[in-house]
């Protein structure tokens, strides 16, 4: 019996209740926060056409469409898909392109054991939709994120080539008008070689999984995927600290990795933030809106941005409140941080790591704010030192493990 819930009456503690559209049907399903989409599709919704091979983003067997874009189900937290439209290979049963591809795969001996075939069909369909012509090199690049142990690829490439050629000969052009590169979300190889072409699938859509552009607009409503709190203790009166928070340029100069790209207005600022987690780095450019409440000594900073290649994107909100510290004449700043991260960086940016990283950045910020409030020289270069941060993270993790041992 399917474990999908029409409307889960009682949610198991610690699980998420997700509303998704899967293959055109609204579904509600429970999932643990750590569950990836592939497991939820297979084990909770009985959609076993989505295969799992490597489970770390290499083989492409788990490729599905998320809001019309090919994506690795094994790298996608199910919880990040709330409200999304998911299309699995089962959802392509009545699809004309998929039918042409199935026939061509049979004709060209493009499968043997068939393990790679569901992901291969989803990826191939995207190429058929969007490549202007049957270009073997671009087909091979487009399928390079889908591994096949059996066929040697020649039959697969022939099959895809024949379907594209036959459709273009019938006067069916590529879908045009979109800007994204070929390949699965988060694993787009050869993006520089790919012609930017069409958003392919007319499934109900919400925002794409990775923002394509450099500067994002701030959406009207924002529900962060993750949140945490931080505190900063400063040896200065709350009023002085709050006044400094009103000086955007001064705060930006104190924030490691931050640069302003223009003169800030009273309530809006444009700039960039360099972030590096493990082997993946990104410089986010974006915009933030700022609101201060002098009566409550509090405020909100709400921002969104994307990295230069548009492969990782973030949206976040920081609420702060300045209050008295433990000692007279000191201040304690409470920060409520909420954020959503998408794209390759999200695959490394597990909430625990991000929290640790934020803790290190906040410690640097506090030191720099303290120096500025003390009238000391402007803080030294505000650049983020990824090696130092990473070393600090590793030290902290080792200390925590040793403490547990
Ligand atoms: S199972 Fe291999 S990429 Fe997802
Ligand atoms: S047909 Fe066996 S892995 Fe591709």
Image (tube, rainbow, N blue to C red):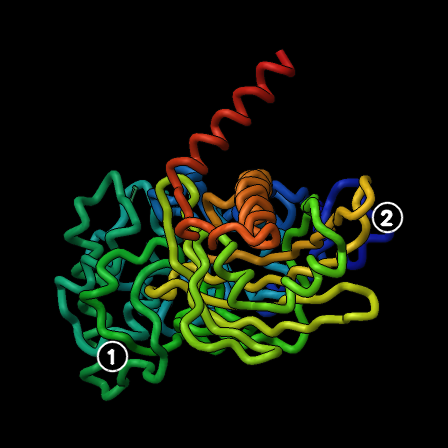
Q: Is residue 403 left or right of residue 342?
A: right
27 up-or-down from 132: above or below: above
Residue found at the far top of this picture? 405
Q: Is residue 402 left or right of residue 179?
A: right
Residue found at the far front of this picture? 375
* Image position, residue 42 (x, y; %): 56, 46
**Residue under numbered circle 2:** 10
Which residue is at a point 53% across and 56% down the rendered structure image? Answer: 341
Residue 200 in view in this figure: yes
120 up-or-down from 325: above or below: below
23 up-or-down from 329: above or below: below
User: Can you say which quadrant of the picture contains the C terminus?
Assistant: top right
Q: 310 or 171, which lies in front?
A: 310
Crowding near the residue tagged with mark 1, few <14, some 14–19, many ≥20 C-alpha atoms within 10 Å: some
Instruction: Name the quarter showing ligand 2.
Output: top left
**Residue under numbered circle 1:** 167
At mark 2, the secondary structure is loop
* Image position, residue 167 (x, y; %): 24, 79
* Image position, residue 56 (x, y; %): 41, 40
Residue 149: mark? none
* Image position, residue 321 (x, y; %): 76, 58
Q: 397 or 4, which lies in front?
A: 397
183 up-or-down from 361: above or below: below
Q: Is residue 215 left or right of residue 367?
A: left
Q: 135 or 322, which lies in front?
A: 322
Q: 78 or 235, which lies in front?
A: 235
Which residue is at a point 51% across and 72% down the rendered structure image? Answer: 287
Crowding near the residue tagged with mark 2, few <14, some 14–19, many ≥20 C-alpha atoms within 10 Å: few
Determine the image quadrant of residue 193. Answer: bottom left
At mark 1, the secondary structure is helix
Determine the image quadrant of residue 32. Answer: top right
């Amino acid at each position: 019996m399917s474990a999908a819930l029409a409307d889960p009456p009682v949610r198991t503690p610690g699980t998420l209740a997700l509303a998704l559209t899967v293959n055109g049907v609204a579904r509600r399903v429970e999932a643990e926060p750590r569950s990836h989409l592939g497991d939820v599709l297979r084990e909770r919704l009985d959609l076993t056409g989505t295969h799992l091979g490597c489970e770390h983003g290499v083989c492409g067997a788990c490729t599905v469409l998320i809001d019309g874009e090919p994506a690795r189900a094994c790298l996608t937290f199910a919880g990040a898909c709330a409200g999304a439209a998911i299309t699995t290979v089962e959802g392509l049963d009545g699809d004309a392109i998929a039918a042409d591809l199935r026939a061509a795969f049979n004709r060209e001996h493009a499968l043997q054991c068939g393990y790679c075939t569901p992901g291969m069909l989803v990826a191939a369909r995207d190429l058929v939709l969007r490549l202007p012509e049957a270009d073997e090199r671009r087909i091979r690049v487009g399928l390079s994120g889908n591994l096949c142990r059996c066929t040697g690829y020649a039959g697969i490439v022939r099959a895809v080539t024949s379907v594209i050629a036959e459709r273009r000969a019938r006067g069916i052009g590529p879908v045009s008008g979109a800007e994204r590169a070929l390949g699965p979300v988060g694993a787009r190889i050869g993006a520089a070689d790919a012609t930017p072409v069409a958003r392919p699938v007319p499934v109900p859509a919400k925002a794409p999984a990775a923002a394509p552009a450099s500067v994002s607009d701030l959406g009207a409503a924002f529900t962060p995927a993750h949140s945490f709190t931080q505190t900063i203790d400063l040896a200065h009166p709350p009023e002085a600290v709050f006044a400094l928070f009103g000086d955007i340029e001064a705060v930006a100069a104190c924030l490691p990795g931050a640069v302003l790209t223009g003169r800030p207005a009273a309530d809006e600022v444009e700039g960039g933030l360099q972030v590096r987690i493990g082997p993946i780095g990104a410089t986010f450019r974006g915009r933030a809106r700022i609101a201060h409440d002098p009566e409550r000594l509090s405020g909100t900073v709400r921002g969104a941005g994307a990295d230069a290649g548009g492969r990782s994107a973030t949206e976040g909100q920081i609420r702060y409140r300045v209050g008295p510290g433990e000692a007279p004449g000191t201040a304690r700043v409470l920060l409520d941080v909420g954020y959503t991260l998408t794209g390759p960086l999200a695959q490394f940016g597990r909430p625990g790591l991000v929290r640790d990283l934020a803790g290190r950045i906040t410690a640097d910020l506090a030191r720099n704010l303290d120096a500025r409030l003390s009238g000391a020289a402007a803080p030294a270069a505000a650049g983020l030192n990824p090696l130092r941060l990473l070393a600090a993270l590793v030290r902290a993790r080792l200390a925590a493990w040793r403490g547990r041992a």
